[in-house]
Image: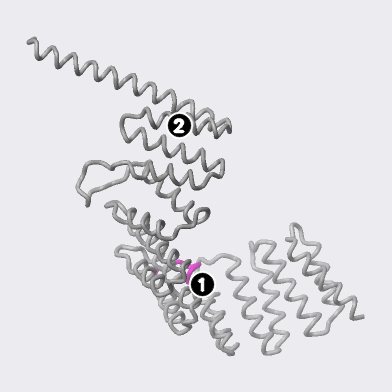
Amino acid sequence: MTTNTARLFLAAALALSTAVFAYDDFLDAYRDGYEKFQAGDFDQAETAFLAAAKLATVNSHAGPAWVRVAQSREKQEQWTAAADAYERAADLPLEDKPADQLRPHRHIQDALKALDTIYSRHVRNPQRLRDLYARRLAYADTSPRDEADLLKKTAESFLKEDEKEKAIDWLQRAVNTPGLSPADKSGHLHKLGEFFHRFGKNEQAITTYRENVALKGGHPHRVAESIRNIGDIILRQGDPSGARDWYTRILSVEGIRPDHISQAHAKIADTYRRERDYEKALSEFRKAAAVPELQVRHKGEALYLAAEILGRDMRRVEEAKAAFDAILALPDVDQRTVDRVTNELKRMAKQK
């Protein structure tokens, strides 16, 4: 072995030894932080993870440590400080690859998702949110579903700033995401219809909802909700019969939840009630309550409305009282329904 070769070998051995010791120190600090975090000592966990982050010699170690620092701060509800730590994790360099092949390390994914929550709920910063969404959209492995979801979130951030046209534009991009499944597209179409509806653009809302209803393979829950919303718009325009036609269509959608079926019957009942056809309204409310596997709170709501019609509209007071008493006897009936029933019984007692 030549002298130069020996020197290179020794230098490499020393570097390796130093790296091993550095890694051991990092690992000790990280484990210490983890144990304190699990024990609920978040202040000391933060200190240990900070030490680990400083001892880390590669980003694949430093990144997770900064994420843990942020999580420790979150547990202490230090939202701004937590965001700063997540930003440190997210800003660590990615792999050395061309921009169109970038894929985030796990710690960057975790940091960006956590920042989404913090900037949405705790430290409201719509512009920073949009910057984060744009960064996530740039990743080569973003699926059509994730891409559409990020576009939708961008739209929602504009909505919070009352930027209506920008919100609509970005949500339309979500709808038109290439490769998006019909079920996912259905959800974004329904949301776009809700945006138009919210902004008072009823005709555009109805057109969008209709597109969702006509979509092959659309998500049954979103399709049912689009049909319901069309009925609601028509009802507010003063056409109970036309609204009823739409509410009835909900019942033919396959794969919807029991509460959707119950709500459809209740909506149909409301149209009859507006037309003062109380027998049909009562029948529909009872159908709403009788849907199999319906949650107690939905059952109680439908039974309450049926009893209310008996007492207020049909003047069948004794039947109404018996119906209200039956609601109170339901197992696990929710407090809101109990309060409504109690108040109605008190009102009826005063009218004697």
Task: Tell me if residue 147 comes above or below residue 22 in the rendering.
Answer: below
Element type where label 1 sits in the image? helix
Quadrant location of the N terminus in the rendered image? top left
- Residue drawn at 54 percent across, 82 percent down: 233
Q: Which residues are magenta?
A: 217-224
Task: Tell me if residue 271 comes above or below residue 115 in the rendering.
Answer: below
Residue nearest the viewer, comparing 148 with 129? 129
Residue ranking furthest to the right: 352
- Residue drawn at 40 percent across, 36 percent down: 64
Task: Tell me if residue 319 comes above or below residue 21 in the rendering.
Answer: below
Q: How many marks?
A: 2
Image quadrant assignment for residue 96: top left
Q: Nearer the viewer, mark 1 or mark 2?
A: 2
Find the distance from the CA under tag 1 to the CA under tag 2. 49 Å
Looking at the image, residue 97 sits to the left or right of residue 171; the answer is: left
Report the residue marked by disc 2.
Answer: 49
Report the residue marked by disc 1.
Answer: 224
Residue nearest the viewer, comparing 18 with 148? 18
Type of the residue with mark 1: Ala
Type of the residue with mark 2: Phe
Q: Is residue 95 magenta?
A: no
Residue nearest the viewer, comparing 78 with 19? 78
Q: Whole-percent x and y of residue 135?
A: 32, 54
